[in-house]
Amino acid sequence: MHGWLAFLAGILVVVSGLLIVSASIGITFYGLALEVEALLAGILLIIAAIAAWLFYVGIKAQYKKVKTGREALIGAKGVAITDLKPKGEVRVMGEFWQATAKDTIANGEAVEVVDMEGMFLVVKLAEQNT
């Protein structure tokens, strides 16, 4: 899909460039007025810009980090809702999760997800950046 968008943008730029050059030196196609050719070239350039922008957005989306599932949760920061001794509840990415911790974590402390076992998060005390 992205290849076709790039190809379309390239063809539209070439055609509009030819129309601009031909209108500037006075050559008309199919009996069109020079103003119509210039307007058509401008429209084709706008469509080419839109196709190029769609191409850019599509390529950029392919390199984005995954934002759902296990991959998004591991490394995410949250807060302990209950005391974790070693099991309890945490809030991570706006959701409540059952969690286990290797050490005791008090209610309200910042946690970081290190693993996921089934539907349970494995958390540790988050390091404070000061």
Image (tube, rainbow, N blue to C red):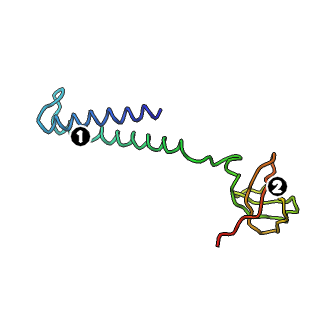
Quarter of image, res 87: bottom right
> Residue at 68% of width from left, 47% of height from top?
71
Q: Position of residue 59 (x, y in %)?
A: 48, 41
Query: Which of 20 and 28 lies nearest the eye of the viewer?
Result: 20
Query: Under tag 1, what secondary structure?
Result: helix
Q: Which residue is mark 2?
A: 98
Label 1 CA crowd tier, 10 Å (few <14, some 14–19, many 20+) = some
Closer to the eye: label 2 or 1 = 2
- Residue sitting farthest toward the left: 26
- Residue sitting farthest toward the top: 30
Q: Position of residue 126 (x, y in %)?
A: 72, 64
Query: Under tag 2, what secondary structure?
Result: strand
Q: Is residue 118 left or right of residue 42?
A: right
Q: Which residue is mark 1?
A: 39
> Residue at 38% of width from left, 42% of height from top?
50
Question: Could you say which disc has been placed on residue 97 in the image?
Answer: none
Q: Position of residue 92 (x, y in %)?
A: 72, 58
Query: Which of 51 and 130 lies nearest the eye of the viewer?
Result: 130
Label 2 CA crowd tier, 10 Å (few <14, some 14–19, many 20+) = some
Residue type, label 2 = Gln
Above or below residue 104? Residue 47 is: above
Above or below residue 115? Residue 16 is: above
Q: Is residue 67 left or right of residue 1?
A: right
Query: Which of 110 and 32 lies nearest the eye of the viewer?
Result: 110
Marks 2 and 1: CB-CB under 8 Å? Answer: no
Q: Quadrant of the C terminus?
A: bottom right
Residue type, label 1 = Leu
